[in-house]
Image: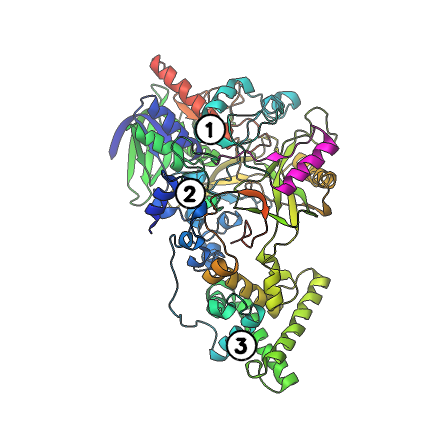
């Protein structure tokens, strides 16, 4: 069996794996980065500028192929004809769930992972979030506070390039922003109307996004082509492929091995340390072992949990590092899809130009200063205003020359506010290995048990009410509310399955993302989260990863790891 | 111009703002795979194809820009019927197509493609009114032949090279974002 030794092993090459690779190599460690999927060549694989007519189904997708091989992945909006190749084959990568508890597990297995298709929204958490568990008793207290992470937010924002507008809100701290993308005229008008109606309590601002509005760190400013999820040849948005992995490669100390499916972490009982990982080659099915002084798990919340659960041994019979029994538990995802849409009159002679890869954000306002009677915690809104073009012709009466020419003028301005809410950490939302199912490489599949609680459902209802209130204050007409019923997982913010905490009896990781049980294992992806807040989580994962790398390197220097 | 050249050009010393002065046509050449070849029909027979082509050209006729038939929307519809629709959708569409002839024979004494353009348009106006009435009652009319025909035609036309470049004057790389500019046909967020 092939065997090689490294200072550090990083499992996963996406949002957090890329950061671990960059930080560890820049600190001088000889680092192996293992990616389960194939390599990505931006010159070939990034197809955001291919015109729609060059696709066989003009963007409608190969419906039959999707139904056969990607029945789960196709439920994600970004799994389109150009980008479905960035989503896993559901037949090769099965998982199971209870019949009455659907869970949509949306995955990317290739170098860069889901950082290629992510929606790029980047928000800091605040102490409202880090103190939430301690305040209401759900979950365990975070072992860190905003002050611990703030310098690391600064650090990752400066490298990644986050554009946004400072608002001075305590519940959504400002960051190291590049110039903000502008609101369009209707969004600006809504901002003013909402400010008149709600003061500083409810603020409509431009989304904070990991898309460059000016050239930054050798990457070009956005050119507003639109479909970011297909890749970006100008590297204008942050992804592992666009930013962190090239930085790691630059050091000369990264060995990136694609097609490397990690089956388990190998544990050395005499030293009470992980000694390395067992890998199955995706293509040849050859097994190999790589050893390292430290292991960073960055495979995503569910994959990292799965690998750890599969790394059982006599010392850890229910999964590596699972003394607490919390490994695989407390799975969360943001609840989404309460909100409202409306029409805005005025500005008929105006339209935006260019495809701004960003929308509006309305930061959380529930349970910030007052207590809501129906639910704990809160939610924010994303969305925006725009004018429909030719596609409205498909449901418009008429045909012929006048009809064709009428479609040259865009339709009335439409606005949507779409809510994303915090999910409580609950012990009965959990994953386990399915004894009856394996993936294409013989590794046990996950069985996922996850459902929304009454708190999330109450929040969805409230979203539709407050969205309508704000649209009304903003001067919108024909307001329609909605409350969708989306399965957990579909927001693609799954997290919590190896939570951080102060007590080894109730948590898997300590304040530095280090396993309580096995000191040379760090988990820095979404698995580490002790609560979910309501903000998009990737920026926090990045900051936690950079911080954990700094800690691990320091401990190694002192000879403690 | 290949992709690598484009990458150097838009990421390089020229700077992004230089893009604003470049003709959209040149930008559209990026990564283009032009389908110039006539393709063999997969589902539609000659008569059905003639009917589909005629209906489509009435829906989006040639005006100061080309119409649906110039984009060979019939071939796109044939492809969707063959590879994209399920059996139920395909059979429903073909039955609807036959029904156009039945209506034409009953009203005008000849099949659709052999009657006059005025009569063809009159017949289609009747179908369109049915779709509108259905939508008023049900909120949708997706199963109605003419709703599907119109959807196929519009989608095929506006996503064709002619639809994108001549009718919509769309730029793949706008190069800038103007939050509140004058009206234009290149609507953000749509292909």
Residue B108 sits in quarter: bottom right
Is disc 1 placed on a helix, strand or loop?
Answer: helix
Which residue is denoted by mark 2 in the rendering? B18
Discs 3, 1 touching: Cβ within 8 Å: no
Which residue is denoted by mark 1 in the rendering? A542
Q: CA distance from mark 2 to mark 3?
A: 47 Å
Q: How many marks?
A: 3
Q: Crowdedness of circle 1 by 10 Å Cα count: few (<14), some, many (20+)? A: many
Pick the residue in front: B181 or A11: B181
View extreme (top): residue: A558
Is disc 3 placed on a helix, strand or loop?
Answer: helix
Is disc 2 placed on a helix, strand or loop?
Answer: helix
Labelled disc at residue B51: 3
Residue A275 in view (yes/no):
no
Disc 2 versus disc 3: nearer the observer: 2
Q: Which residues are magenta?
A: A184-211
């Amino acid at each position: 069996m092939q065997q090689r030794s490294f200072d550090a092993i990083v499992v996963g090459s996406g949002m957090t794996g890329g950061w671990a690779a960059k930080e560890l190599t820049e600190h001088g460690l000889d680092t192996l980065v293992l990616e389960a999927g194939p390599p990505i060549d931006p010159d070939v694989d990034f197809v955001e500028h291919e015109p729609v007519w060059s696709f066989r189904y003009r963007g409608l997708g190969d419906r039959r192929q999707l139904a056969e091989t990607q029945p789960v992945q196709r439920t994600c909006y970004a799994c389109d004809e150009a980008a479905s190749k960035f989503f896993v084959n559901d037949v090769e990568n099965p998982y199971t769930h209870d019949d009455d508890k659907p869970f949509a597990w949306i995955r990317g297995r290739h170098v860069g992972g889901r950082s290629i298709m992510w929606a790029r929204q980047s928000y800091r958490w605040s102490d409202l979030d880090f103190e939430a568990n301690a305040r209401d008793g759900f979950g365990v207290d975070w072992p860190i506070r905003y002050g611990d992470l703030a310098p690391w937010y600064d650090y990752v924002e400066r490298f990644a390039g986050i554009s946004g507008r400072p608002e001075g809100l305590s519940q959504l701290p400002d960051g190291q922003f590049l110039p903000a993308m502008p609101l369009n005229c209707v969004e600006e008008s809504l901002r003013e109307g909402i400010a008149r109606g709600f003061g500083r309590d409810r603020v409509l601002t431009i989304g904070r996004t990991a898309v460059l509005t000016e050239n930054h760190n050798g990457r070009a400013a956005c050119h507003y082509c639109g479909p970011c999820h297909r890749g970006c040849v100008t590297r204008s948005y942050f992804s592992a492929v666009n930013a962190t992995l090239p930085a790691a490669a630059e050091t000369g100390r990264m060995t990136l091995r694609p097609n490397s499916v990690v089956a388990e972490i190998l544990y050395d009982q005499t030293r009470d340390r992980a000694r390395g990982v067992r890998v199955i080659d995706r293509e040849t099915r050859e097994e190999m072992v790589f050893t390292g002084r430290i292991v960073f798990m960055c495979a995503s919340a569910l994959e990292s949990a799965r690998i750890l659960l599969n790394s059982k041994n006599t010392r850890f019979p229910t999964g590596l590092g699972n003394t607490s029994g919390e490994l695989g538990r407390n799975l969360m995802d943001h609840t989404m899809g309460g909100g409202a849409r409306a029409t805005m009159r005025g500005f008929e002679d105006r339209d935006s130009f260019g495809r701004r890869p960003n929308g509006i954000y309305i930061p959380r306002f529930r349970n910030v200063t007052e207590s809501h009677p129906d639910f704990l915690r809160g939610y924010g809104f994303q969305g925006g205003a725009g004018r429909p073009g030719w596609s409205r012709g498909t449901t418009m009466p008429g045909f012929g020359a006048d009809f064709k020419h009428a479609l040259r003028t865009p339709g009335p301005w439409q606005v949507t506010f779409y809510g994303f809410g915090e999910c409580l950490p609950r012990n009965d939302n959990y994953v386990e290995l399915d004894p009856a199912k394996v993936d294409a490489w013989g590794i046990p599949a996950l069985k996922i048990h996850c459902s929304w609680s009454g708190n999330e459902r109450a929040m969805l209802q409230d979203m539709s009410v407050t969205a309508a209130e704000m649209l009304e204050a903003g001067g919108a007409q024909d307001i329609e509310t909605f409350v969708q019923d989306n399965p957990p997982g579909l927001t693609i913010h799954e997290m919590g399955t190896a939570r951080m905490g102060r007590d080894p009896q109730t948590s898997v990781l300590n304040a530095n993302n280090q396993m309580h049980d096995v000191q040379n294992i760090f988990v820095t992806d979404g698995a580490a989260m002790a609560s979910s807040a309501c903000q998009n989580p990737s920026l926090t994962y990045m900051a936690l990863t950079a911080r954990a790398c700094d800690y691990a390197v320091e401990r190694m220097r002192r000879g403690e790891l | 111009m290949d992709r690598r050249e484009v990458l150097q050009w838009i990421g390089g010393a020229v700077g992004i703002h230089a893009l604003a002065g470049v003709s959209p046509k040149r930008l559209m050449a990026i990564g283009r795979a032009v389908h110039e070849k006539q393709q063999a029909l997969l589902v539609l027979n000659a008569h059905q194809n003639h009917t589909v082509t005629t209906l489509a050209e009435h829906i989006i006729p040639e005006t100061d820009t080309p119409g649906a038939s110039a984009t060979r929307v019939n071939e796109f519809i044939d492809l969707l019927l063959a590879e994209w629709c399920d059996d139920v959708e395909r059979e429903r569409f073909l039955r609807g197509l036959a029904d156009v002839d039945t209506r034409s024979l009953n009203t005008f004494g000849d099949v659709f493609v052999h009657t006059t353009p005025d009569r063809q348009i009159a017949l289609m106006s009747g179908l369109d009114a049915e779709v509108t009435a259905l939508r008023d009652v049900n909120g949708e009319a997706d199963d109605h032949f003419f709703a599907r025909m119109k959807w196929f035609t519009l989608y095929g036309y506006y996503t064709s090279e002619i639809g994108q470049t001549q009718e919509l004057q769309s730029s793949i790389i706008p190069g800038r974002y103007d939050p509140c500019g004058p009206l234009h046909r290149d609507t953000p967020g749509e292909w």
